[in-house]
Amino acid sequence: MNLNLTNQVAIVTGASRGIGRAIAELLSQEGMRLVLAARSEADLKHVAESCKTETVIFPADLRDEKNPQLLIDFAISQFGQIDLLVNNAGATKRGDFLQLSEDDWQDGFALKFYSAVRCIRAAWPHLSKSQGSVVNIVGIGGRTGSADFAIGGAVNAGLLNLTKVLADKGITDGVKVNAINPGYIATDRLKSRITALAAEKGISADQAALELADSLGVKRFGNPAEIAAAVAFLASGVSGYCQGTILDADGGRTRTL
Ligand SMILES: NC(=O)c1ccc[n+]([C@@H]2O[C@H](COP(=O)([O-])OP(=O)(O)OC[C@H]3O[C@@H](n4cnc5c(N)ncnc54)[C@H](OP(=O)(O)O)[C@@H]3O)[C@@H](O)[C@H]2O)c1
């Protein structure tokens, strides 16, 4: 299937590793020109080197209120257009509700919620002009609460609602806005958890991964490339009638409607 993304311009936040890296690499394979954001300049350079199309990097802390606007300005200065914004940067601290500090809450919302709000607000006129798209990478914790994921759950629920709000606005303004809820994806963080479990139980990493997946109610963990494929679909005209769609890419973990 030809997604017709060649030469379009995408901004991917949190592109230095994990899911964001996979998204950047796949969009590049599909011919998109890229602006990649995260804090680590070295990691971003590394990802940019693996991209086949024109790719520029914007190393910055997106919790800083002024940086989302600067990122969008940078993208326009480099390419003169924005066709896709992928809000992927995010890290929220897990833990018991009573142990989470005021700073933990502020930090979780500052990165994953407010940076997305600010990036979308700054990019919106450009996306409206290009009739472009926003894809928010959110998470299944936004639908299903769990005791050790208070911050992530609240942030994700907020982002899912914002996706619906902006999808409504996008009907008028010509911007397609959708979200993906990844389930348990095998990024470095999860791999470390599997390695630790394997060492603790004296079993192989493969066996530990199977046992962990089983305990979480899925057959296997997802690959970052599977989330990237969903982004490419939502970025393309193939998904032209998806507006405010929340796509659970979670191996069947979410059983509720
Ligand atoms: N992996 C999963 O199983 C899973 C499940 C559900 C949802 N998600 C969501 O999917 C997204 C990506 O997850 P992931 O597992 O790929 O995460 P990850 O491996 O921890 O990568 C996070 C990315 O965000 C960047 N980042 C972190 N803090 C930042 C800051 N202050 N300013 C700018 N960039 C920052 C990181 O780069 P730097 O450190 O260089 O800044 C990195 O590129 C997140 O929003 C996460 O909540 C993941």
Image (cartoon, rainbow, N blue to C red):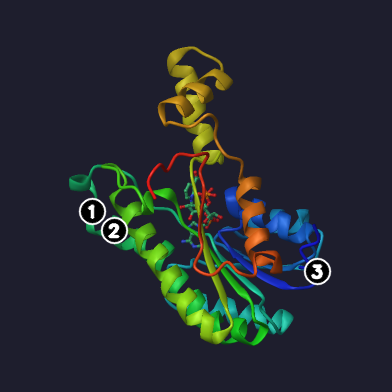
Residue at image location 50% in from the left, 36% down from the top? 190
Q: List x then y, in percent, for residue 162.
A: 41, 70
- Residue 58 or residue 209, whichever sits in front: 209
Mark 3, ligand 1, within 8 Å: the answer is: no
What amino acid is at disc 2? Trp
For image coordinates 48% across by 29% down, the residue present is: 213
Q: Is residue 20 visible?
A: yes
In the displayed structure, 225 sits above or below 45; it is: above
Question: Could you say which quadrant of the image residue 164 lies in?
Answer: bottom left
Cβ at disc 1 under 8 Å from ligand 1: no
Q: Secondary structure at mark 1?
A: loop
Let me know if residue 67 appears in the view. no
Q: Position of residue 16 (x, y in %)?
A: 61, 55
Instruction: Name the image quarter holding residue 204.
Output: top right
Q: Is residue 240 above or below residue 72?
A: above
Task: Identify the element where label 2 is drawn.
Answer: helix
Residue 231, percent from left and from top: 62, 58
Q: Within 10 Å of the Cα at label 2, are there few (<14), some (14-19), or many (20+) other Cα atoms?
A: some
Label disc, if present, on residue 101 of the rendered structure: 1
For this rendering, which residue is in front, 91 or 135? 135
**What residue does disc 3 label?**
6
Q: Estimate the spatial distance between the alpha carbons at disc 1 and disc 3, rounded to whole Å.
A: 45 Å
According to the picture, the residue beneath numbered tag 2 turns out to be 105
Disc 3 marks which amino acid?
Thr
Residue at figure coordinates x 47%, y 81% from the top left: 169
Q: Is residue 178 left or right of residue 256?
A: right
Contact? badges 1 and 2 (CB < 8 Å)? yes
Residue lying farthest to the left in this orientation: 98
Q: Earlier in the sequence, mark 3 or mark 2?
A: 3
